[in-house]
C-alpha cells in the first residue's frame, strides 16, 4: 500500500547505502589511528644540533708573550685576535686552555663568547704554577675536551714559539697561530712544531686577513658536527591527515545520521 519511492526510505535492513554512518566511522577511526601513530618518511635537522664546529683556543702564557716587539704585547694581541674570531664564530662552542710549564683547562667549549673573553683577559704569566712550554700537554688537553663534548672540532694554538715535539698527529686537527711582528719571519720552532703535529700555520697580520683565514680553517677542519645519528630526527607527518579527518567529521553533521 506504500509507494515504492517512499518505501525504500522507511525500510530497515534493506538496500544498504555506500555512504553510511558505519562506513564513515570506520574510515575516521582508521585515519585517526594512522595520524596518531606519527607516520614519517623524511629526516630533518635537529633544532638542538650545533650549526658550527666547536674549537678549543690554546694560549701560551709565558713571560715571552709579554715582550713589546708587538704593539700591543703578544698576549694582548692574542686576546684581540680571539675576540675578533669569536665575533665571526658567534654561537659556535669554543673553549680555552692556558699553558706554560703545565697545561690547564680554563673553560670547556661554550657558545658564550663573552665568558671566554673574560677568562682570557685574566690570564697572566705570574698566575701559571710552572714555567716552561708544555705545548704537547696543552694540545692533548684541548683534544680531550673536544672528545668529551662529543661534537668533534679543532684546536687553535696562539704562541710565539714552540718546543721540540715528537712526530705524530694530534687527536684533533691543530692550527698554529704564530705571534711575531709583521714583516719578520716566524720563529723556526713554529714550523717544526707544525710539522710534528701535522698542523697548519697562520701568521699574524695587521688587518683582519689572519682572522678570516683562521675562521675558514675552523669552519672546515675535521668532520662536520653533530655526530652521526644525533643531528637528524624523523619528522612526524600525521598532521597532514587532519584535514581529511575533519572532512569526515563534518559529514557527521548530515541531518538524520545516527549511530547506536
Image (cartoon, grey):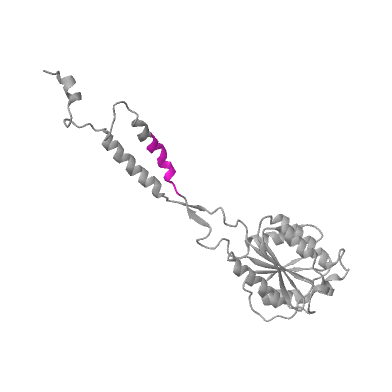
Name the side, left or right, on which 168 lies relative to 177. Answer: left
Magenta-span inclusion, residue 232: no
Q: Nearer the viewer, residue 161 or 111?
A: 111
Query: In the rendering, at what x and y percent does residue 87 appear?
Result: 73, 55
Name the side, left or right, on which 12 lies relative to 164. Answer: left
The quarter of the rendered structure image containing the C terminus is top left
- In the rendered view, would you say 230 is above or below 103? above
Residue 206 visible (yes or no): yes
Quadrant hosting residue 160? bottom right
Residue at 82% in and 67% down? 75
Query: In the rendering, at what x and y percent does residue 251 appear?
Result: 34, 31
Look at the image and give the residue range highlighted in magenta: 236-246
Residue 204 visible (yes or no): no
Quadrant hosting residue 106? bottom right
Residue at 81% in and 73% down? 127
The count of marks equals 0
Quadrant hosting residue 129? bottom right
Magenta-span inclusion, residue 242: yes
Residue at 29% in and 40% down? 26
Q: Nearer the viewer, residue 207 or 6?
A: 6
Residue farthest to the left, as pictured:
1
Query: In the rendering, at what x and y percent does residue 171 appear?
Result: 62, 73
Amino acid at each position: 500500500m506504500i509507494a515504492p519511492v517512499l518505501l525504500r526510505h522507511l525500510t530497515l535492513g534493506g538496500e544498504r547505502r555506500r555512504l553510511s554512518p558505519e562506513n564513515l566511522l570506520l574510515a575516521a577511526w582508521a585515519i585517526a589511528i594512522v595520524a596518531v601513530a606519527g607516520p614519517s618518511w623524511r629526516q630533518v635537522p635537529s633544532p638542538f644540533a650545533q650549526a658550527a664546529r666547536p674549537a678549543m683556543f690554546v694560549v701560551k702564557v709565558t713571560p715571552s708573550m709579554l715582550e713589546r716587539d708587538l704593539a700591543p704585547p703578544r698576549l694582548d694581541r692574542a686576546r684581540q685576535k680571539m675576540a675578533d674570531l669569536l665575533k665571526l664564530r658567534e654561537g659556535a662552542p669554543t673553549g680555552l686552555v692556558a699553558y706554560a710549564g703545565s697545561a690547564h683547562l680554563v673553560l670547556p667549549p661554550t657558545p658564550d663568547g663573552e665568558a671566554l673573553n673574560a677568562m682570557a683577559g685574566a690570564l697572566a704569566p705570574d698566575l701559571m704554577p710552572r714555567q716552561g712550554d708544555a705545548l704537547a700537554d696543552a694540545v692533548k688537553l684541548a683534544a680531550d675536551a673536544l672528545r668529551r663534548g662529543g661534537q668533534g672540532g679543532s684546536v687553535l694554538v696562539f704562541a710565539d714559539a714552540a718546543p721540540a715535539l715528537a712526530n705524530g698527529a694530534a687527536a684533533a686537527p691543530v692550527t698554529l697561530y704564530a705571534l711575531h711582528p709583521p714583516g719578520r719571519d716566524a720563529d723556526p720552532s713554529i714550523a717544526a712544531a707544525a710539522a710534528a703535529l701535522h698542523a697548519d700555520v697562520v701568521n699574524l697580520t695587521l688587518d683582519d686577513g689572519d682572522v678570516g683565514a683562521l675562521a675558514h680553517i675552523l669552519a672546515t677542519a675535521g668532520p662536520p658536527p653533530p655526530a652521526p645519528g644525533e643531528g637528524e630526527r624523523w619528522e612526524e607527518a600525521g598532521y597532514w591527515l587532519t584535514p581529511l579527518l575533519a572532512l569526515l567529521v563534518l559529514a557527521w553533521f548530515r541531518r538524520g545520521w545516527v549511530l547506536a
